[in-house]
Every structure is written in structure tokens, then in C-alpha cells.
Image (cartoon, rainbow, N blue to C red):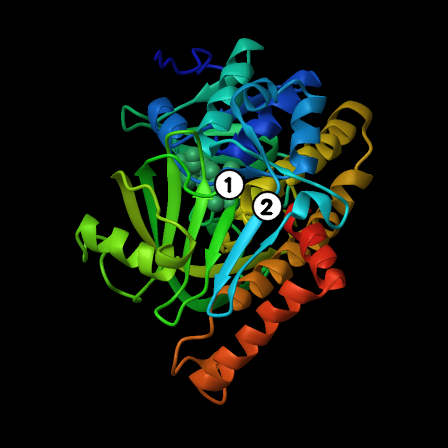
Amino acid sequence: MTERNDPHTSCRSADVVVLGAGPAGLVLGVLLHAAGIDCLILERASRARVQTRARAGFLAPNTVRILDRYGLAGGLHRDGRRHGACEFRTQDGRFRLDYGTLGQGGRHHVYPQQNLVTDLLTHYLDIGGRIRFHTDALAVHDADSARPSVTTREPDGRSIRWNARYVAGCDGRHGAARRSLRPGTARYHHHDHGVTWLGLLAETPPSLDAVGYAVHGRGFAGHMARTADVTRYYLQWQRGAPADAWPEQRLWDELDLRMRAADHGPLQRGRLLERGVFDLTCDVVEPLRHGSLLLAGDAASLLAPAAAKGANLAVLEAEILAEALADALLRGDTAGLDAYSDRCLAHIWRAQEFTGWMTRLLHAPPEGSPGAGAGPHFQAGLQRSRLNSLRTSRIHQDWFAENYVGV
Ligand code: APR
């Protein structure tokens, strides 16, 4: 794998400086470059790291439409798999929702995010896009002027200032874009769902032909396909407990128990390639535009993973932003930029709402948490009723399907 930083360091400017080479930054970079806009991506990590970071994998129909429109979907059509079913396993038995035939009939493409990122990066470099790896953005300056800039720490330790007309903050929740917002100009809405997951990546084929959601007295367990040989599993986890608290054997035994393998068939075991613990938290920044600085992807809003919306929102926002920037830079029309924040926030709040609903569907709030209300039995009763409504009501199923594949 070659790694070559952009050689034009002396230029030190671009019409759009994009922070971060995740799905948001790369889609934005490709679309801007294709529109003939001078753009530079600054990425803190190495190319190898960016291309191997295993994360999400479920791409919604609208995301695939966007990627298709710009010739970015070759890999996912070749190697991705269509997916249109979930299976819920509860104390009342199991039920399957073929969401691909419910609601508006949308299906996902399952394609690991690191493969998508690799495709986007390869395409961006092939069309001559400029990117610098190992380049840590430190701060965005003068965002309320027409000449913003970004300071970086370069691989050799030097600090450089990059001038721009616009800066796109696609550098995630802890990136420089969020840090650079002037105090008092943004509202942060942060919410903790009160639940922690242990995410496992296992070297084993999927054991179900559906996304598996198991609701159990011992906590949630999930099964999500990735590729023919790799499957993601989740276990609701004690907050604060380390990822390596249990040996592999015990994790598989627990997955069997919560997924009720004795009743519904065994899970194929395999080597665990990765494990990580994360709290299900979410946030939204309002507004997303701060003069010449615009936020997209996780920098704009972080979503809990229960409904796999994060990467899909990132791609949608990147497309909306690319069109708005092209209008502003090529045609002097800033209406798209003026509307950018409100347009994206409508999608973001919708996705947050559904993700919150999914999170409550899959977990009763832990005892003692503010959401636990009248106590665990009451909450478990509500959760069971929610699941039964989804099991029996066609209207509820159509609503679920429409939201599950939509952004
Ligand atoms: N300077 C430069 N790059 C940075 C900095 C910084 N200070 N901070 C972070 N980055 C880079 C990260 O290394 C990463 O490559 O920004 C990139 C952000 O990429 P993602 O985290 O993938 O975020 P985004 O493009 O917004 O994608 C969002 O994908 O898997 C999902 O959960 C993820 O929902 C999220 C979605």
C-alpha cells in the first residue's frame, strides 16, 4: 500500500479544506473535486489506519443511490450483499420482519465501512484529489470571516497554516472543528442512553440470514452480518467493565444464552478479531454552519449504533454540503449554504428519534438510571409490550421498515 502525502505543500491553500477522511470527508472530497473545486483533505491518521478501521456496514437505499450517482458504488455492488430481514428473539419466542417487503420496500447493502472508505479514497486519488495523511488539524481560525484557515501539526512536527474559503469539519466528535466553535455560538445536545455494549468482530460466517436482536433478562445481544467470513456480535455490557473482562469461551456461551441458541439453533463460533466497549451516547450540534466552517458526519451529530444510521447520515450530509459549496463557489449562490444546517438537522433529529426508539426497544433502562421510572419490572413490561406490538401490528411493522432503511 503506497502512502504519499500531497506534494504541493508550498501552495498551502485550497478553496475548501476538509478535515477528516472518513465517509463524510471522502464523499465530500470526491464530489467537490468532480465539480472542479480545489479541495484538500487533512487526515490525522495513516492511510493504512483509515482503510482498516472496522466500523459500520449497513448502507441504506438512499446512500447507495448517492454513491451510484457519482460512480462510487462499484465495490459494494460487486462484494456487498443485499439484506432485508431482522429477527427478534424474546421471552415470547422469535419473530422475523422482512423489512424489504414492508413499508416502502427498501433493503440495505451490507458492505464493511472500511471497504467503502478504501473505495472512496482510491477513487479520490485516481481523479487527482489532494490529501495529506498524518496531519493533525489543531484549530480552525477566523470562521466568521471569508478567509478562514486551519493550523495543523505536520508529520515532521512543524505547524502549518492552510488558507481556505470554506472549511468542512468532517473530523468526528473529538475533532478540531467542534473544538474551534466560538463559545456561546453552538448548542450541544448530549444524551446518554444509559446502556453500554461490548462489540465483537468474529472470524465466522453469519449464523442467521437476518440481523438478530435478542432481548433477554441478562441483557441485549445482537448479530449483524459483515462478510461471508466475518460477523459482528454485540453484548449489553456492564458500564465501566473492561472489554477483556471475560475470556472468549464465556462470551460465546453468553451469546448462546441470550440469543437462545438452544431453542433457535447454534451460533457458529470463531476467533474473535476485535473487541471494544462503548457507551450508547448521542449528541447533536446546532447549528451546523458557523460562517465559513460547516460540520458534517459525526462532527455534526453522533448516533448510537442501534439503528446503523451514522454512516448513512454522513454520506447524505456530504452530498448536500457539496452541492451547497459548488453553488457558492462556482455560481456565487449561497442559498444552499444558508439552508444547509436546517436541512441536515431535520434528517439528524429524525434519525436520533428512531435510534432512541430502537434503543428503548432493545433495552429496558438499567435499574437506578433516571429513565428507569417505576422500576425494572415496569420497564420490562413496557419493553415487552413494544415488542409485541411490533410482532402483531402491520402498521407498526410498516413504520419500522420505513424508518429502519430511511435517513
Ligand atoms: N485532524 C485531522 N483528522 C482528524 C482529526 C484532526 N484533528 N480528528 C479526527 N480526524 C479524522 C479521523 O482520523 C477520521 O479518519 O477524521 C476522520 C473522521 O472519520 P469518521 O470517524 O469515520 O467520521 P465520519 O466521516 O463523520 O463518518 C461518520 O461512520 O461508522 C460511522 O460511527 C461512524 O457514524 C459514523 C460515520
Q: In the drawing, does residue 353 fall left or right of residue 376?
A: right
Give the quadrant of the N terminus.
top left
Q: Is the Cβ of the residue at disc 2 closer than 8 Å to that at disc 1?
A: yes
| Residue 36, placed above or below residue 54 | above
Q: Earlier in the sequence, mark 2 or mark 1?
A: 2
Q: Secondary structure at mark 2?
A: loop
* In front of the other: 105 or 171: 105
Q: How many residues crowd mark 2 within 10 Å: few (<14), some (14–19), many (20+)?
A: many
Q: Position of residue 220 (x, y in %)?
A: 41, 62
Task: Give the amino acid at mark 2.
Answer: Ala
Query: Can residue 302 be seen in this snapshot?
Result: no
Residue that extends furthest to the bottom in the rendered view of this protein: 374
Q: Position of residue 28 (x, y in %)?
A: 61, 29
- Residue at image location 45% in from the left, 35% down from the top: 226
* In front of the other: 65 or 394: 394
Task: Give the amino acid at mark 1.
Answer: Asp
- Residue at image location 66% in from the left, 18% down from the top: 71
Q: Which residue is mark 1?
A: 209
Q: Based on the displayed image, in which of its 4 quarters is residue 36 positioned?
A: top right
Q: Which residue is mark 2?
A: 85
Q: Based on the displayed image, in which of its 4 quarters is residue 145 positioned?
A: top right
Q: Secondary structure at mark 1?
A: loop
Q: In the drawing, does residue 360 fall left or right of residue 61?
A: left
Q: How many residues crowd mark 1 within 10 Å: few (<14), some (14–19), many (20+)?
A: some
Query: Can residue 402 be seen in this snapshot?
Result: yes
* In front of the other: 40 or 322: 322
Mark 2 and mark 1: Cα distance apart in space: 7 Å
